[in-house]
Every structure is written in structure tokens, then in C-alpha cells.
Image (cartoon, helix red, strand yellow):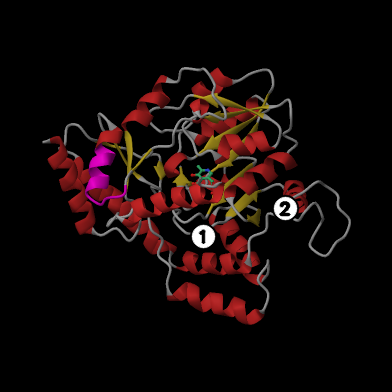
């Protein structure tokens, strides 16, 4: 009989087999010599936990995101949990979050003891709007966990104003939206705090990694305590909170600093690739290329199209060696939440949305090949 470890290895092997057949991957990072140079410095320093590269990475991101404070984390989920706990979100509180979202969002709410209250999304932007937030609001709502899904935003000004007016905390999960702007402001500058991810498929990556950003000095001090095992800093023995070890390593931060040095090129390629998909697919009647918010200067996290049946087209891509994925599976119907609510927009978008390859390394020929596959499929 197979034991649990065998089954785990098999599942991982299936996944690796599948992605190794993708000649155009859904995503791949660009790691090279710039990262190696800084990594060597870290190795030579003989200190691999937090150090000067973590501080440099924080400072650079703080400036890019136009925030007063930045604190590095080992991933975005840890930053979300820490920020929410530090703002006093706890058992008995409701936190509104969209259902079409990464599991990190409702899971991080649940990790504080609070209750995730799922909401419908605005069809045009794939994000929460004041209308969908208002519909989900209860007497116990303490916060809104807003998500800049796939790098996009809805009207962040009206969402901020709604939260201010109703005395709600606004958490901005802009995990995939680094470098994105809304009405000439950094998307990450919105919210009581915002959180970024540097997982391997983000515009810049550290493998795993996250950042919490805020303008609130007290909040950043509290987050710093939670992040360092409940103590003010490493080396202090007094434990003030039941905290965690959520630190980023020097190795990861060095990679992040090197990635930032190349980010202009990544941003440009991602925007150009999205435009090329737009122009090559505009005459295919069955395909609607997702329009990112024109009021923003958005860096697309994914190239997204809507088609009559997403899973059928994805099977066609997989058979032809192209990496493609559905949108996030609605969280309200996942086994661990299993809410009986009807979200028709969420349901429709999940059934029809396809994430196409989106790496900055994607070549013009790759995009033409993908669009040709789509055209052939619908002819
Ligand atoms: C919107 C969103 N939130 C949170 C996360 C989780 O980030 P991490 O894996 O760094 O915890 C992701 C990851 O892709 C994401 O897309």
C-alpha cells in the first residue's frame, strides 16, 4: 500500500510532468548574473538571515510604493496575517473579501480568528466595488480585504472613501500589483496597509517573499513585533506578543534587489505583450481580451481572455504545449469554506476566464503561435 509520502511525491510528480511539457510556460522568472553577483556577496558575508539587503529591499519598495514604512516578510500571506492581527482584527469580526481570489486572502482572515465574508465582484474590473462591498456588509464588519486581482483595480478612491465613511479598516492585497498605478498614485499606496508578494510568478520575484507597507508608525512597530517571534527585535528576550517567525532571508532580499534593477524591462515587456494579445485577437468573435482599468497605468499580472468555455480551450493549449490556467477557483465554494451563496458574476467569470502565458520572457513568436492556436480552435 502507498504511504502518505509516496502519494505526495506522486502528486508533485504529476504536476512537474505536466509543466515540463509546456514549451511556452504560463510563467517563468528571469534570474541571471545580476542575482548571482549579489548572492555571492551574501554568502561571503556569512550571514543569511535578515541583514543589509533586506533593509535595502524594504527601502527601495517603500519609495516605489510611495509609503512611509515597509517591512519585509517571508511571503504575502504572512504580511496579511500580521497586518490584520496588528490592527486588532480577531474572533467575532467579519472581514469582506471577494470570492474569486487566491486562497491566501480568506485563509489569512481565518488565521486571525475573524470570519471571511465573501462578496461578488465587479464584472468589468474583477475587483470589489462599493456596490459589492455594501451588499456583503454586516453589523460585525470590521474590515475590507480589497484585492488588486491580476494587477487590476476598480475605483480605489471610492472604495477608500466608503471605508473611511463607514469606519472600516481597508486592507489592500496588491500582491500582484507592484508598479501599478491608479490615477497617478501607486496602487500599493492605498489602504491602512498594503501587502505585496514576490512569489515566482510576480513581476519581480524572490522565490517566496512579501512586503507590508503603511504610513502608520504604530502599526509598523506592532507588525515588527509579531514578525520577530513577538519580540521587539532579534536578540531581545522579552516576548510581548504571541508572534511568529515571518522573516525574509538575505539570500531572497539580494535576489529582490537585483530583480528591481531589471524591473523597467519587465514592466515594459508585460505591457507590450498584453497589447499584442489585444491586437492579434480583436477579430476573433468568441474571444474577449480582458481590458485592464483605463484609469490606471496597470502592469498586467496575467494576460486574460474570456471565451465560451475556459476548460475546453485550456485542454487544447495543454495538448499543444502551452501553459494556461483558469482564473482562481471561487473560494466560497471550496471544501474548507463551502458557503451556500449564489455569485452569478463570479461563477460566469470562472467558467469563461483563461490566464494565458504572461512571463516577460514571452517572445512575439510565442504570442503569435498562441493566437494562431486560438484562431484555429474557433474556426
Ligand atoms: C492576490 C494574491 N494574494 C495573495 C497571494 C499570496 O502570496 P504569497 O504566496 O506570497 O503568500 C497571491 C499569490 O499569488 C495573490 O495573487
Q: Quadrant of residue 27?
A: bottom left
120 inside magenta stretch:
no
Residue 95 place in picture, x, y as percent: 63, 29
Looking at the image, which is closer to me, 372 or 265? 372
Q: Residue at x 68, y 54 (%)?
A: 246
Judged left or right of residue 26, residue 211 is right
Q: CA distance from mark 2 to mark 1?
A: 19 Å
Q: Residue at x 57, y 38 (%)?
A: 105
Residue 11 place in picture, x, y as percent: 45, 47
Count of numbered marks:
2
Residue named by callout 2: 227
Q: Residue at x 19, y 32 (%)?
A: 286
Q: Quadrant of residue 90?
A: top right
Judged left or right of residue 125, residue 218 is right
Residue named by callout 1: 207
- Picture layout, residue 263 above or below residue 133: below
Q: Quadrant of residue 173?
A: top right
Q: Is residue 197 visible?
A: yes
Looking at the image, which is closer to me, 128 or 185? 128
Category of crowding for the residue at label 1, using alpha-carbon neighbours closer than 10 angstroms: few (below 14), some (14–19), many (at least 20): some
Amino acid at each position: 500500500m502507498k504511504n502518505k509520502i509516496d502519494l505526495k511525491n506522486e502528486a508533485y510528480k504529476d504536476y512537474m510532468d505536466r509543466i515540463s511539457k509546456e514549451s511556452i510556460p504560463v510563467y517563468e522568472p528571469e534570474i541571471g548574473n545580476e542575482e548571482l553577483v549579489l548572492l555571492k556577496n551574501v554568502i561571503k558575508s556569512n550571514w543569511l538571515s535578515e541583514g543589509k539587503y533586506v533593509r535595502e529591499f524594504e527601502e527601495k519598495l517603500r519609495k516605489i510604493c510611495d509609503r512611509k514604512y515597509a517591512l519585509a516578510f517571508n511571503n504575502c500571506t504572512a504580511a496579511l496575517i500580521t497586518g490584520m492581527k496588528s490592527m486588532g482584527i480577531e474572533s467575532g469580526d467579519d472581514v469582506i473579501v471577494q470570492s474569486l481570489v487566491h486562497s491566501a486572502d480568506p485563509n489569512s482572515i481565518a488565521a486571525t480568528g475573524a470570519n471571511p465574508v465573501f462578496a461578488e465582484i465587479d464584472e468589468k474590473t474583477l475587483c470589489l466595488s462599493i456596490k459589492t462591498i455594501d451588499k456583503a456588509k454586516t453589523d460585525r464588519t470590521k474590515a475590507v480585504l480589497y484585492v488588486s486581482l491580476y494587477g487590476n483595480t476598480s475605483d480605489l478612491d471610492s472604495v477608500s472613501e466608503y471605508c473611511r465613511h463607514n469606519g472600516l479598516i481597508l486592507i489592500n492585497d496588491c500582491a500582484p500589483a507592484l508598479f501599478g498605478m491608479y490615477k497617478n498614485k501607486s496602487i500599493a499606496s492605498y489602504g491602512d496597509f498594503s501587502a505585496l508578494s514576490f512569489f515566482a510568478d510576480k513581476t519581480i520575484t524572490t522565490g517566496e517573499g512579501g512586503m507590508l507597507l503603511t504610513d502608520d508608525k504604530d502599526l509598523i512597530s506592532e507588525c515588527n513585533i509579531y514578525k520577530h517571534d513577538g519580540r521587539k527585535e532579534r536578540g531581545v528576550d522579552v516576548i510581548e506578543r504571541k508572534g511568529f517567525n515571518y522573516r525574509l532571508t538575505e539570500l531572497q532580499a539580494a535576489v529582490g534587489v537585483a530583480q528591481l534593477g531589471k524591473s523597467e524591462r519587465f514592466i515594459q515587456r508585460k505591457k507590450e505583450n498584453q497589447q499584442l494579445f489585444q491586437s492579434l485577437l480583436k477579430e476573433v468573435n468568441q474571444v474577449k481580451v480582458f481590458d485592464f482599468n483605463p484609469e490606471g497605468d496597470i502592469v498586467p499580472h496575467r494576460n486574460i481572455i474570456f471565451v465560451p468555455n475556459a476548460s475546453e480551450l485550456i485542454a487544447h493549449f495543454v495538448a499543444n504545449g502551452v501553459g494556461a490556467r483558469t482564473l482562481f477557483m471561487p473560494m466560497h465554494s471550496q471544501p474548507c469554506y463551502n458557503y451556500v451563496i449564489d455569485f452569478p458574476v463570479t461563477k460566469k467569470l470562472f467558467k469563461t476566464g483563461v490566464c494565458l502565458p504572461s512571463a516577460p520572457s514571452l517572445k512575439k513568436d510565442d504570442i503569435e503561435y498562441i493566437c494562431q492556436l486560438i484562431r484555429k480552435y474557433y474556426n
